[in-house]
Image (cartoon, helix red, strand yellow):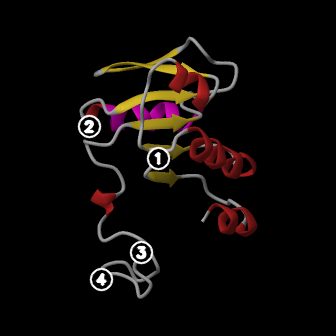
Amino acid sequence: MHKNGVAGFPYYVGINSLSELATREDRIVVFNILGKESSTVTPVSHDYSGGNIVFGTGPGKSGKFLTTKSGKIPVYNSIKEGMEAGHEFNTAVVYLPPSGVKDGVAEAVRQNPKLKKVIVLTEKVSVKDSRIMR
């Protein structure tokens, strides 16, 4: 973490470059993968990264797939279900509604001891929840 900021980023961030957020070597799970925004952005990200999104979650959507040019991404009800199916990941990308972000992050942390990064793309997450997650 860089408490004094980083050149090019006039505010506090924990990275040197946007390229550090997710790399082609990361194995990624996407929360709410079939949601409106995620189902549009995820296929582009998956194709660009060479297919490093291993699965997604969507309550009640287990057994479905998100189709991309690089192949189909399986969808499970929960992180636990995806991991029980044999998928491994080290990065979680969160597209949940603001009220569900904290619980989603907690699920990823609780279920996967190999988790290295969590990327929350949701806007308007409460300050209280943000402080708890941090």
Kindly report the distance in space between the C-alpha atoms of the residues bearing marks 4 and 1: 28 Å
Q: Nearer the viewer, residue 61 or 86?
A: 86
Observer-side mark, 4 or 3, equals 3
Farthest-out residue, bottom = 4
Name the residue beneath numbered marker 3: 1
The structure residue drawn at horizontal position 24% and vertical position 32%, both measured from the top left corner, is: 50
Element marked by disc 3: loop
Pointer 2: what residue? 48
What secondary structure is marked by label 1? loop
Q: In the image, is residue 121 part of the stretch drawn in magenta?
A: no
Query: Could you tell me the amino acid type at mark 2?
Result: Tyr
Marked residue nearer the N-terminal end (4 or 1): 4
Q: Main secondary structure of the magenta part?
A: helix
Residue situated furthest front in the rendering: 113
Find the magenta span and give its range. Answer: 35-46
Quadrant for the C terminus, please. bottom right
The tag earlier along the polypeptide, 1 or 2, is: 2
Marks 1 and 2 sit apart, C-alpha to C-alpha, by: 22 Å
* Mark 1 neighbour density, 10 Å: few (under 14) some (14–19) many (20 or more): some
Name the mark on residue 7: 4
The answer to whether the residues at label 4 and label 1 have Cβ atoms under 8 Å apart is no
